[in-house]
């Protein structure tokens, strides 16, 4: 993609929308972890097997929360990428405007 | 069964107005073992759902990884793009790999439930088998040893017949009370004897009999089960004018109705009541009150017009229709009960057995038979109650009648069995209405989740509270 390409200007917004979707998914994963832990705790089951199953569920819920955090981290990375792409595109656009008089002169000279 | 009469012999704590009895045990309902297994299956299903969601989430991250706008932006900032791709790639893989773990846990939970149920069934079958085998052995031994014990028994009976009338009254009373006390204080023994009854007959007669229901079925064949007639009769009890407010009111209503057909008024044998209630929104529901046995001494050759006789007990224990149950269905039609209007069947003793039988087998009838309250009645002869139905069973500790099925109360979502120490004197006293009034008070005061839920469902269905629209007493007699 050419930094001066008009599509480059819209790229940061598109990348940020991806980041937004990942953040929403992170919240969903955290809710799922909490819901499963509550369900396991609220199941009226006692005994050794019950204790093991409940502990296993809490471990897996902890893993889910880690996945949620990883979604957030990926969203952060996307935000950084969007910011970087936006900055590069802006610099490219600014360079093109500054170069406009020289291009006009070159074009007139070529036209003779 | 019944024959205990409604009031007398209730003993300490008997009679209306006394305090609640002590709850000894609660089986089934929302806090029962079956409910726990159902909860575990829900948990396993939730684990499976999560596994499916994780796969979907992983696919979504994979889509983000290959997003066209993201890929096209790569040349503008290769370093940050590289970080994004790395994070998304790791995330998609991690989330996907987490999925089978949840599925494995779902399998483990389902396996635990299956193992627990299998173990329960094995132990229950083993105990029932032991009882049955002990009965078979005893029956065979009785037959094989008959040449030895029959003469001894004849002589012993003769001696007893001679000595018994000469015993002082106090001694005779003491012997009888001792026997009675032994049974009511150790109800598990009586239940075991009932459970072994089928085996005893099998051993003695050489006919394969699985349990008390088979044995009862064999005995019931000796009786005639002909047609019955049902008609409305001009009788009433005071409770008929009032809608029940709690379980205590249901039991008190049953007591009054049982008194109507008590030993002093045999002309009312076979009477039962259909009470129609209206909710504030005008919808109707019906409570059918079913008293117990009118004649406990019926022999095949003494059978008469009484539909609630010993034959009915045997037939119901064997899981068969009786003139009483057919009569109740007939009366519902005569009372104008319409399809879809909820019906509660409340019965004492044989009435409770009839209620349980109708709930389990009344599916073909055009009535909404969804609730039952059984009082002092065996119910294990019913293999299973329909899903979604509700049965509340009251048993007085020491009452031998509910033990006639030879099995403890079954744990199911549909049925809650509450065993209460309601007191009483002797076999008849423990089965009478005094202790059951105490049992009902204990149920109404109970905070046990299963009991609270079942009573709450009776209330929610409109059987407790409301306004009495009509109260009709019917009588069923053998033709």
Image (spheres, grey):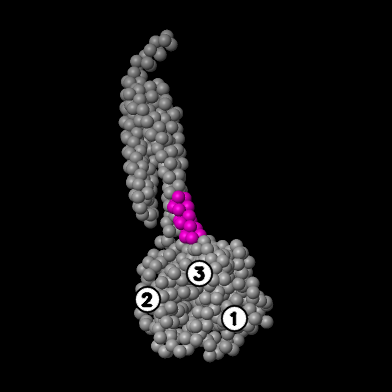
Marked residue chain, label 2: B
Residue behind mark 2 = B21
**Which mark is on residue B380?**
none
How would you rate the neighbour count of disc 2 (Cα within 10 Å): few for under 14, some for 14-19, many for 20 or more?
many
Give the magenta part as a residue range: B113-130
**Which mark is on residue B194?**
3
**Which mark is on residue B298?**
1
Mark 2 lies on a secondary structure that is loop
Which residue shows up at 52% across the image and 83% down it?
B158
Reply above or below: B303 against B142.
below
Reply above or below: B26 against B231.
above
Marks 3 and 1 on same chain: yes
Q: Quadrant of residue B298?
A: bottom right
Picture coordinates of residue B131, whole percent (x, y):
49, 63
Secondary structure mostly taken by the magenta-highlighted segment of the chain: helix
Marked residue chain, label 1: B
Q: CA distance from mark 3 to mark 1?
A: 20 Å
Which residue shows up at 59% across the image and 89% down it?
B267
Image quarter (top left, top right, bottom left or bottom right) of the C terminus of chain B: bottom right
């Amino acid at each position: 993609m050419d930094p001066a390409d008009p599509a480059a200007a819209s790229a940061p917004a598109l990348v940020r929308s991806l980041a937004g979707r990942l953040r929403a998914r992170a919240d969903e994963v955290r809710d799922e972890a909490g819901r499963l832990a509550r369900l396991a705790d609220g199941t009226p089951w006692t005994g050794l097997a019950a204790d093991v199953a409940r502990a296993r569920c809490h471990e897996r819920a902890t893993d889910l929360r880690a996945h949620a955090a990883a979604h957030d981290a990926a969203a952060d990375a996307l935000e950084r990428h969007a910011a970087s792409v936006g900055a590069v595109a802006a610099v490219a656009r600014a360079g093109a405007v500054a170069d406009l008089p020289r291009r006009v002169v070159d074009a007139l000279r070529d036209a003779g | 069964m019944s024959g205990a009469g409604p009031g007398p012999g209730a003993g300490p704590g008997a009679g209306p107005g006394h305090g609640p009895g002590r709850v000894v045990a609660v089986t089934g309902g929302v806090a029962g073992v079956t409910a726990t297994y159902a909860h575990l299956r829900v948990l396993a299903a939730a684990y499976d759902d999560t596994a499916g969601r994780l796969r979907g989430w992983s696919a979504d991250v994979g889509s983000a990884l290959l997003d066209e706008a993201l890929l096209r932006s790569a040349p503008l900032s290769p370093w940050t793009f590289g970080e994004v791709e790395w994070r998304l790639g790791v995330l998609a893989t991690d989330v996907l790999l987490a999925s089978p773990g949840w599925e494995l846990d779902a399998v483990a939970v389902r396996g635990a439930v299956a193992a627990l149920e299998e173990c329960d069934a094995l132990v229950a079958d083993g105990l029932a088998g032991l009882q049955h085998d002990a009965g078979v052995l005893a029956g065979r031994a009785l037959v094989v040893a008959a040449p030895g014990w029959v003469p001894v028994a004849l002589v012993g009976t003769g001696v007893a017949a001679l000595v018994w009338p000469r015993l002082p009254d106090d001694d005779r009373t003491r012997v009888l009370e001792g026997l009675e006390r032994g049974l009511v204080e150790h109800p598990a023994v009586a239940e075991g004897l009932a459970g072994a009854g089928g085996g005893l007959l099998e051993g003695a007669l050489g006919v394969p009999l699985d349990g008390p229901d088979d044995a009862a079925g064999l005995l019931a064949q000796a009786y005639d089960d002909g047609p019955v007639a049902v008609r409305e009769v001009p009788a009433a009890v005071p409770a008929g004018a009032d809608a029940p407010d709690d379980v205590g009111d249901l039991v008190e209503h049953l007591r009054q109705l049982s008194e109507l057909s008590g030993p002093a008024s045999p002309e009312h044998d076979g009477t039962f009541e259909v009470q129609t209630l209206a909710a504030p929104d005008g919808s109707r529901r019906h409570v059918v009150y079913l008293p117990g046995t009118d004649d406990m001494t019926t022999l095949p050759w003494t059978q008469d017009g009484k539909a609630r006789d010993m034959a009915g007990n045997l037939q119901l224990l064997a899981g068969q229709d009786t003139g009483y149950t057919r009569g109740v269905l007939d009366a519902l039609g005569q009372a104008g009960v319409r399809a879809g209007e909820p019906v509660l069947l409340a019965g004492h003793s044989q009435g409770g057995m009839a209620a349980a039988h109708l709930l389990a087998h009344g599916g073909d009838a055009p009535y909404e038979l969804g609730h039952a309250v059984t009082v002092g009645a065996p119910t294990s002869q019913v293999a299973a109650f329909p899903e979604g139905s509700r049965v509340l069973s009251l048993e007085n500790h020491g009452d031998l009648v509910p033990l006639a099925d030879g099995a403890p109360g079954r744990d199911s979502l549909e049925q809650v069995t509450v065993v209460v120490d309601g007191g009483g004197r002797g076999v008849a006293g423990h089965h009478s209405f005094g202790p059951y009034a105490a049992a009902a008070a204990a149920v109404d005061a109970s905070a046990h989740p299963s009991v609270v839920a079942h009573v709450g469902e009776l209330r929610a269905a409109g059987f407790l509270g409301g306004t009495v629209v009509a109260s009709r007493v019917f009588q069923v007699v053998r033709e």
